Amino acid sequence: MTQNSEKATVVWQIDVAHEEELIALAHEISGFVQSGDFIALTGDLGVGKTTFARALICEFFNDPKIEVPSPTFTLMQIYEVERQRLVHADFYRVNSMQDLAGLGWDETIEEALALVEWAERIPEALPKNRLEIALNFGQADNPNERRITITAYGTFAARLAPFKSIRDLLRQSGWAQAHRSFLQGDASTRAYETLENKDGAKAILMISPQRPDGPPIRYGKSYSQIARLAENVTPFVAIAQGLRERGFSAPEIYASDLESGILLVEDLGRVGIIDDSGPILVRYLEAAAVLAELHAQSLPETIKVEEGRYYHIPPYDLDALLIEVELLLDWYVDHVNVSVASGARANFINLWRQALMNITNSPPTWTLRDYHSPNLIWLESREGMGRIGIIDFQDCVLGNPAYDLASLGQDARVTIADAFELKLLAHYANLRREKDPQFNMAEFARSYSILAAQRNTKILGIFARLNRRDGKPHYLVHLPRIEAYLKKSLRHPALEEIKAWYTTNIPTLFSNE
């Protein structure tokens, strides 16, 4: 290993008033590091390096009873718990790289978290990607105070930036002492944590840094640009505020760092609109009523986020809808071992273009886009439509009102029976007619079938991609359900030619009929 020649990024300096704060910082760092990382601890004798290391090791293995002796004389202490490995070393009595080689240093720390005191004594042993934590004595009149300088090298700089932003946000908002637990995320790259203060107050920490744009694939734009996907947290904040202002139960934003992509939001709970028996009709009907109320309103295209910052909701235009159905060609056909010729691919896109043309010309409304069971919370203590908590809407676009009802009525994660789906459609239509006697149910049903088919086509591609590209095979369990939804939607006369294309080019879809 060679020392990094690149400039380091000094992330920040922290003053701790006493040992308890030093230990608390070590606990925080333990949640950030992982196997394969290298942490260099530097500082004078008696400054607290071993105290810091001991606290980090105990927290890393979630075991406060682990004995952590100083490695001053043994040079290395190796800890292995449930496939996690940590090497705690002390270079104070190490004189050269030859000494380290004699200890089998490189082999010992391979795939382990290396935590090294007096690391500065052998600079040649420091990898280019590392975290240096320098402990120094603080004010002379406070012998317990320490100044901690955390410096990131190489790839650690990008990793540590959001860690610092989270720490700062939690302190500024009064949640620094909250207990933090990882919360299972969704199919996106976002991460979530649950927070609970000592007084029982709860919140959700949403971690969604700005996504790097993918390569241009058409018109000089990336897939996410064409599909109108949110690339930062600003849309989430904007739509949450817009929904709440209109009486809907979206999470309150407690604190935000828009530039870093860190949000602290209201925790609406874990009670959904399904249970172990499946979908709960009364809750789905209320969710449909929320859409009917939303779609009956005159909604703005621009929302104020904060002073001087506005968010413009993008259109769910033809390019966005088409790039989504192409996911089936890009990923699903390979999954089912089907080859589609270039002419058939072009015909597929042209057929969808014709079917979607009128959809995009209809008066738009807010299309939340993932309005289905994983993103809907049942709030028993609230009244009316307020009982439906909505937690996922950052990809909101201006689109046809039938899209979100199709997301609900053909829920990708739970099977919705035909009779159940018809009740949702009837309930929605009756509520729309109450507000607007001119509401055209036949036209809405046509749009519903087309957009349900479009959405299920897209999801088949996405779930196949999650398996093939992202190593998430558990999404494949949903494919039979989504295939069944797609075949049902294709029965509408408006989709006759598209159904013929699927029958000809992906016959496996209809092999059971």
Image: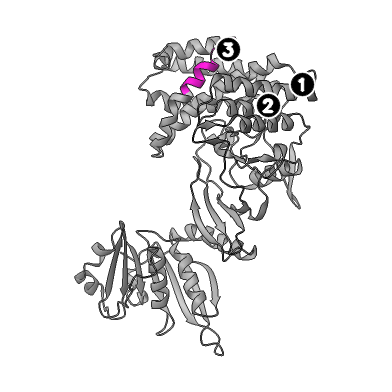
Q: Residue at x 61, y 33 (%)?
A: 369
Q: Quadrant of residue 464?
A: top left
Dots 3, 2 in contact, CB < 8 A: no
Element type at mark 2 = loop
Marked residue nearer the N-terminal end (1 or 2): 2
Is 176 inside the magenta-drawn segment? Answer: no
Q: Quadrant of the N terminus?
A: bottom left
Q: Observer-nearest residue: 82 or 467?
A: 82
Dots 3, 1 in contact, CB < 8 A: no
Q: Quadrant of the C terminus?
A: top left
| Image location of residue 487, percent across then percent down | 49, 16
Is residue 8 shown to the viewer in this render?
Answer: no
Colour style of the rendered protein structure: one colour
The kind of residue on which mark 3 rests is: His
Reading the image, the residue beneath label 3 is 492
Dots 1, 2 in contact, CB < 8 A: no
Total labels: the figure holds: 3
Reading the image, the residue beneath label 2 is 401
Point out the stretch of residues depicted in magenta.
483-495
Q: Residue at x 73, y 42 (%)?
A: 242
Q: Residue at x 36, y 70 (%)?
A: 65
Is 335 above or below relative to 383?
Answer: above
Element type at mark 1 = helix
Marked residue nearer the N-terminal end (3 or 1): 1
Question: From the viewer's perspective, is the residue at label 3 or at label 1 nearer?
Answer: 1
Q: CA distance from mark 1 to mark 2?
A: 14 Å
